[in-house]
Image (cartoon, rainbow, N blue to C red):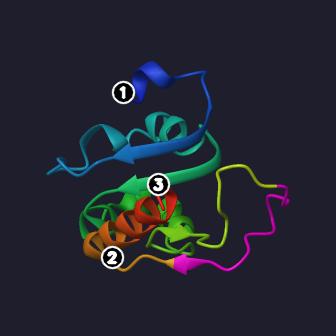
Amino acid sequence: VATVDKFQGQQNDFILLSLVRTRFVGHLRDVRRLIVAMSRARLGLYVFCRRSLFEQCYELQPTFRLLLQRPDQLGLTLDEPTTFTDRHVGDTGTMHLVSGIQEMDSIVNFRMHQLYQ
């Protein structure tokens, strides 16, 4: 876990950017911080925020326009039995979009039940 400022010059496969406790856009109006926040993920960037707050910020509109072209739900490939896969990165398989926390809970419980059977 790190702040945007401390993550300068680093990368990771997946980045979870949490802006859920943000009431004001604040420091992300600084384009340099925005670039660091949005460019450090190699395979996946997940942004958790109040979409309406950030859509209306003039400085962030070009970036959020790009983000909003992507699904705004978590997508899972349910037919992979393990975390190891031989498929290519661009071959996502059958994608299942999770509708909410209750569905995610059901999927996790079902998978755990399958694992221990």
Q: In the rendered structure, which amino acid carries the disc numbered 3? A: Tyr
Q: From the viewer's perspective, is the residue at label 3 or at label 2 nearer?
A: 2
Q: Which residue is drawn at 35% across and 65% down?
A: 109
Give the amino acid type for the residue marked by disc 2 in the picture: Glu
* Sequence order check, earlier mark of 1 and 3: 1
Q: Does 7 sit above or below residue 98?
A: above
| Residue drawn at the location 37% of the way across and 61% of the way down | 58
Q: Can residue 59 be seen in this view?
A: no
Residue of label 1: 3
In depth, the one of 117 and 107 nearer the eye is 117
Magenta residues, start to end: 86-96
* Label 1 packing within 10 angstroms: few (<14), some (14-19), many (20+): few
The residue where tag 3 is placed is: 46
Mark closer to the chain start, 3 or 2: 3
State how far apart marks 3 and 2 are (Cα).
18 Å
Residue 36 visible in rendering: yes
Instruction: Give the residue pinned by disc 2.
Output: 103
